[in-house]
Amino acid sequence: MRQDKIATALLDELWDAGFKLNGPECDKVDEIGRRIEGEHAVLLGLLTDCAAVLRTIDPDDSDEAEKLAALLGAIDRAQAPSRHQGALL
């Protein structure tokens, strides 16, 4: 469950920063984690739609082709950052 990982990561970061949280505060962190996960899913969906539209564009010249390729590459890196870790930008 990705949401649980986000909430756990948030709690760990807060704990490491010296914040000691009680039950209601942990529930708030869980709520924030769920909101972040929902926003993440929406943004990934929008990026997928944008990439699909960009792929339909037939570039007029090599400069436009390079710019489209750069945009598609940036979208791909945003969608799957772990696949690109350690790669040169």
Image: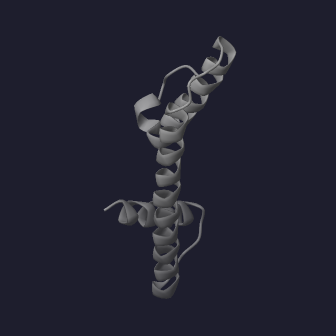
Q: Give the quadrant of the N terminus.
A: bottom left
Question: Could you say which is closer to the camera, residue 68 or residue 44?
Answer: 68
Identified at 56% across, 24% down, the residue is: 58
Q: Give the quadrant of the C terminus.
A: top right
Identified at 53% across, 55% down, the residue is: 43
Identified at 38% across, 60% down, the residue is: 5
Looking at the image, which residue sits at the far right?
A: 63
Q: Residue 69 location in percent, x, y?
A: 56, 24
Question: Could you say which is closer to the camera, residue 42 or residue 20?
Answer: 42
User: Relative to 23, is 47 above or below?
Assistant: above
Color scheme of the displayed model: one colour
Image mark count: 0
User: Relative to 43, is 62 above or below?
Assistant: above
Question: Could you say which is closer to the camera, residue 81 or residue 13?
Answer: 81
Looking at the image, which residue sits at the far top?
A: 62
Find residue 66 and report its image quarter.
top right
Q: Residue 56 location in percent, x, y?
A: 50, 33
Looking at the image, which residue sits at the far bottom?
A: 24
Q: Residue 8 location in percent, x, y?
A: 42, 64
Find residue 19 and report its image quarter.
bottom right
Identified at 46% across, 29% down, the residue is: 84
